[in-house]
Amino acid sequence: MAIPLALIAAITLADVITPREITLSPLLVTAPAITASFAGPWLTGLVSVVTIADEVLLGLHSEMLATRPMQTQLAALVVVSAFLVIFSFVRDRHQEELIRVRSVSEAAQRALLRPLPAGLGPLRLASVYLAAEEEAQIGGDLYAAARTPTGARVVIGDVRGKGLPSVSDAALLLGAFREAARRHATLPDVVLHLDESVRADLEEHAEEFADACENFITAAVLDIPDDRQVVEVIDCGHPPPLLLRDRQVMTLQVAQPAPPLGLGELSQPGYHVQTFDFRAGDTLLLYTDGVIEARGDAGVFYPLAERVTAWPGDGPETLVEHVRDDLLAYVGGRLGDDAAMVAIQRLPEREPG
């Protein structure tokens, strides 16, 4: 508020000390204009009243208040001030609506993409979600984890497409995973249930969305037992996980990947489980293609496997934070697609007692 008030004082002083034929009072309109850029309608109206009153006093001082030019300037100042007050009122209303929309979006994200638990048995978990759109909080990338009687199951996926249909498909898959992860005994049964759920939903909405037959979801589904230091993976067209061990990075490339979810009926897949060593102290990094397909200034894709070697190796939380910060710095702070990451670390076995 010091800036518009100082402007009023400076313009008033300059108008008083200058010759009568030089009129500086029209510059007073800058005070309410500047106020409207940061203040609400009440403060803008207050500064406008002070500005109009000052214009009248300057007209009386110069004995030109009764002249047509001064009356025209005063009328113009009143009209402009009124429009500035209306502008600040409408802008505040839009800001309030945007805040409400953001709060609803954040609530929807928390309900859809629940935060992963910090621990599941002998595992520590951390996750991060980066939305491509600045105002968006949810999208087509997804992840979830569930505890089973023998271990933990984790899924990470990416829905083809954007907008509300992708959010709906992500919600469907997450609900189907949470149900199947606890009820189905084997990992292939879980993935088969997910594929059937996606295909059923696509068939149900085939008329609503013209390209529904082309929709699918890439996913990686993992089973991590408590009693064996391994991880079982079924990859449905998703980027392979990375295994970090002793500052070495290995890609867990599945020999027989399955087709993306939603295309199982077309290819009649047989879900093959690939088993990899997952020892105490190892860390798994799951990610969506929004990470590895992000381009830097030179148009080169983000080299995740190379850049992750700079991680100091202190817990899954620091891993996702390290990759997030490095990725945003690589692309200049703006992603072209949503990106999600999940880090899973197997803790050393506790000694008895």
Image (spheres, rainbow, N blue to C red):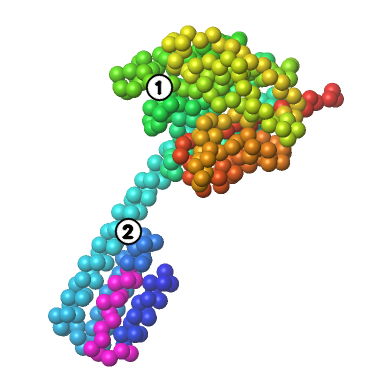
Outermost residue to the right: 353
Residue 17 drawn above or below residue 327? below
Q: Residue at x 48, y 45 (%)?
A: 334
User: Relative to the observer, which residue lies in front, 9 or 152?
Assistant: 152
Magenta region includes residue 18 = yes
List x then y, in percent, for residue 154: 59, 23
Label 1 with label 2: CB-CB less than 8 Å? no
Image position of 215 (left or right of 308): left
List x then y, in percent, for residue 158: 49, 27
Question: Could you say whether the residue bearing mark 2 is in a helix, strand or loop?
Answer: helix
Q: Quadrant of the C terminus?
A: top right
Q: Residue at x 31, y 22 (%)?
A: 210
Question: Could you say whether the residue bearing mark 1 is in a helix, strand or loop?
Answer: loop
Image position of 1 (left or right of 55): right
Q: Magenta residues, as a range?
A: 17-32
Question: Which is more foreground, mark 1 or mark 2?
Answer: 1
Q: Amino acid at mark 1?
A: Asn
Residue 197, picture quadrant: top left
Residue named by callout 2: 88
Magenta region includes residue 302 = no
Residue 291 drawn above or below residue 2? above
Q: Residues within 10 Å of mark 2 (few under 14, many from 20)?
A: many
Q: Residue at x 35, y 16 (%)?
A: 204
Outermost residue to the left: 68
Residue 6, picture quadrant: bottom left
Q: Amino acid at mark 2?
A: Ser
Residue 347 visible within the image: no
List x then y, in percent, for residue 282: 72, 29
Residue 71 visible within the image: yes
Residue named by callout 1: 215
